Amino acid sequence: MMIAETQGKMLHQLIKLLGVSRILEIGTFTGYSTLAMASALHGDNDRLVTLERDPKPQALAKKYIKRLELEDRIDFRLGPAMESLVAIAEERPRDQYDLVFIDADKKGYIPYYDFVMNNNLLSDRGIIVADNVLFFGQVHRIAGYQDDDTAKGSKNIRKKAKYAHEFNKHVLDDSRVQVVILPLFDGVSIINKKRV
Ligand SMILES: C[S@@+](CC[C@H](N)C(=O)[O-])C[C@H]1O[C@@H](n2cnc3c(N)ncnc32)[C@H](O)[C@@H]1O
């Protein structure tokens, strides 16, 4: 599922406000967020790399991006995100990203986050934005902010909410970063490196 319109606007504005020039997106789907972010880039060398394992939505994303003549800024990668991350880090070991947007399988959030942080893919002034971190209110239940601490909904929703909760705790326990969770749509984390 694609991000909400307000989230797209937030990403677009963040990119402009922070002067972001390198973006790494994990989870392209049909390219809505890719487009929201790529259209905020303006420098000749600004680039966005986006990772997707499913060729069907990726083909649609390519079509929309081409229609808007943004294809020169975008490096589309097909395959499991972790494999693409390893390939990118090997191909361009010195490249860093000012914005990493994590919006793929919830189980992968911790491994993606760890890979980015441990391989120095995030620039010092960069941010990681992670989507769905409140999972439609269900993470509040698991975290004990409601009387009833069991998540509601299907087994799949409860499983995803659990992964989101584990990711939130993982980031909070990482002394290298600070994080704020915004209750925008179903929750967005903005994570940055602490300045030493
Ligand atoms: C929530 S959607 C992304 C939505 C997109 N960011 C947007 O707002 O338009 C998640 C996408 O991640 C992809 N995905 C899930 N697991 C993946 C994996 N392990 N590797 C690569 N892509 C994956 C799915 O195929 C899906 O297209």
Image (cartoon, rainbow, N blue to C red):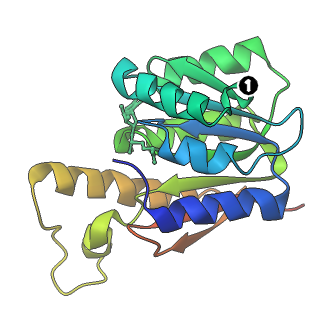
Q: Residue furthest front?
A: 67
Q: Is residue 130 left or right of residue 87?
A: left
Where residue 28 sits in the image (x, y, percent)?
Answer: 48, 35
- Please tell me which residue is depicted at 22% across the width and 50% down the height of the picture: 159
Most foreground residue, 102 or 142 = 102
Instruction: Name the quadrant containing residue 145.
Output: bottom left
Label 1 element class: helix
Quadrant in which the C terminus appears? bottom right
- Please tell me which residue is depicted at 74% across the width and 12% down the height of the picture: 91
Where residue 157 sits in the image (x, y, percent)?
Answer: 19, 55
Instruction: Name the quadrant containing residue 15.
Output: bottom right
Label 1 CB-ligand 1 distance < 8 A:
no
Q: Is residue 141 left or right of residue 40?
A: left
Q: Amino acid at mark 1?
A: Asp
Specify whether residue 40 is in view.
yes
- Please tell me which residue is depicted at 85% across the width and 55% down the height of the picture: 19
Q: Is residue 138 above or below residue 81?
A: below
- Check disc 1: other Cα within 10 Å, few if <14, some if 14-19, many if 20+: few
- Please tell me which residue is depicted at 25% across the width and 74% down the height of the picture: 141
Most foreground residue, 48 or 136 = 48
Quadrant observed for ligand 1 in the rendered image: top left
Q: Is residue 143 above or below residue 83?
A: below
Specify whether residue 175 is in view.
no
Most foreground residue, 43 or 102 = 43
Q: Is residue 62 left or right of residue 137?
A: right
Q: Is residue 185 left or right of residue 126?
A: left
Numbered marks: total:
1
Instruction: Name the quadrant containing residue 134.
Output: bottom left
Q: Is residue 137 above or below residue 13?
A: below
Where residue 45 sits in the image (x, y, percent)?
Answer: 88, 32
Task: Identify the residue position indicated by label 1 in the image.
Answer: 72
